[in-house]
Amino acid sequence: MSLVILDAHSNLFPHPSTAHTEPNGLLAMGGDLSPERLLSAYKQGIFPWYDATTPILWWSPNPRAILRIDDLIISHSLKKILSKQNFSYHADTQFENVISACAERISTNPDLPSTWITPELKQAYIKLHKMGFAHSIEITQGSALVGGLYGVCLGRNFFGESMFHRKSNFSKVALLILAVQLKRWGFSYIDCQVGSKHLASLGAIEIERDHFLKLVQNNLAEDTHSLTGQWALDNDLLPYQKMLFK
């Protein structure tokens, strides 16, 4: 099967069902990272993933990894951190620092591929953030940013992109904070894109792409216009998490 080359003047994508099985989910190449194209992609269960040595590549893997919020696993080490509560959490106050930290984590980890958060991709998500569609969770100790994550929110879909920690387990703290807040807002899952042992240890599962696409469309129909723009997190999320995750 030949790879579809995207029209530079159109935001249309081929249907995800036409994606390659090897490499799993590769759907198309080319185009650009304009906000309009990125939002169109996410609404169809598609995301960009490439590095500086390749053109822009677009993916919709089968199966798809998701984390059902009610299934989030809190490890013993994470519970110890939560019990100390020696950190603060915020949303959308350091988006650029978070995405830069995620890129740094990838590029300096020998077990991970060369960073796919290229300068071009970084600027594209900063634009989405300024438009109110991309969001970050920041975990701080004093003035130090010790963990965080970022992703895209459309309807009641949160498409997770990347997370990082500068102190052990603080990326998991960011994920927990996000999960509890999304639960309050009526979300049921977080998109994790591609499965891994690490994601499975957090409770993520893999579902068929067709199921995922229906989930996306159903959640796009939810009226969440109030969540477009800068997020403000509830200040009592840590006590609340004890009622959700045992």
Image: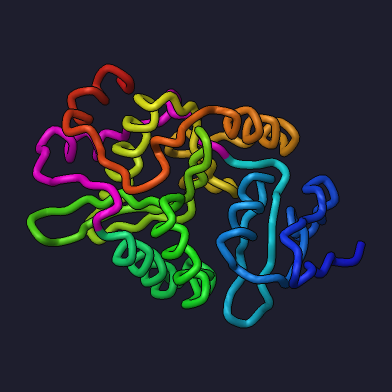
Q: Where residue 95 sits: x, y (%)?
A: 32, 60
Viewer can see residue 21: no
Q: Quadrant of residue 54?
A: bottom right
Range shown magenta? 66-93
Q: Where residue 147 sits: x, y (%)?
A: 27, 55
Residue furthest to the bottom: 53
Q: Is residue 173 left or right of residue 73?
A: left
Q: The C terminus appears in which quarter of the rendering?
A: top left
Q: Nearer the viewer, residue 76 or 144?
A: 144
Q: Quadrant of residue 208?
A: top right
Residue at x-position 75% and y-position 69%: 9
Question: Magenta span has 92?
Answer: yes
Q: Nearer the viewer, residue 84 or 230?
A: 230
Residue furthest to the right: 1
Q: Is residue 9 left or right of residue 76?
A: right
In this view, 83 is above or below 12: above
Q: Where residue 119 sits: x, y (%)?
A: 47, 77
Q: Is residue 128 left or right of residue 102?
A: right
Viewer can see residue 81: yes
Q: Quadrant of residue 73?
A: top left
Residue at x-position 69% and y-position 31%: 214
Residue at x-position 22% and y-position 47%: 90
Residue at x-position 75% and y-position 64%: 10
